Image: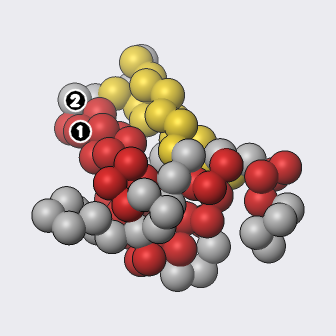
Amino acid sequence: MPDRKIGLVVTHSANDPELATLPFMLATAALAMDVEPVVILQSEGVRLAVAGGAQAAAAEGLAPVADLMGAVLAAGHRVMVCGSCMRPVA
């Protein structure tokens, strides 16, 4: 694991696809710079953890959230989900 970390809080999903995408773009950039991304889904962002949620948050002209999140997970990093925020969604 890298010695450096960056924390990214995602608070949007399909309600604002651009704001849902940008933290994951930063996370994949961090991977390229050997910086560990620590991604936390809160508020509306927890919907990205529900089946189909990441696919629903597609911002025109930006990489798909599902692909970016997949890259973070494939690199061996976690995406943490706020349990309290998840209860109303599940």
Residue 57 appears in which quarter of the rendering? bottom left
Residue 58 appears in which quarter of the rendering? bottom left
Work out which residue is located at the far bottom of the displayed protein and give it: 52
Q: Tell me which amino acid carries mark 1.
A: Ala
Residue 54: x, y in percent?
46, 70
Label annotation for residue 29: 1
Left or right of residue 31, residue 78 in this image: right
Residue 88: x, y in percent?
83, 65
Whether residue 48 is visible: yes
Whether residue 71 is visible: no
* C-alpha distance separating marks 1 and 2: 7 Å
Residue drawn at x 48%, y 34% is 8
Would you say the residues marked 1 and 2 are in contact, meaning their CB atoms lie under 8 Å apart?
A: yes
Residue 90: x, y in percent?
79, 73
Residue 18: x, y in percent?
32, 54
Residue drawn at x 85%, y 62% is 87
Residue 30 appears in which quarter of the rendering? top left
Left or right of residue 66, residue 87 in this image: right
Residue drawn at x 22%, y 29% is 33
Say which of 65 and 78 sits in front.
65
Work out which residue is located at the far top of the displayed protein and give it: 3
Q: Within 10 Å of the Cα at label 2, are there few (<14), some (14-19), or many (20+) other Cα atoms? A: few
Q: Which residue is mark 2?
A: 33
Label annotation for residue 65: none
Q: Tell me which amino acid carries mark 2.
A: Met
Residue drawn at x 62%, y 55% is 44
Label 1 vs label 2, nearer the camera:
1
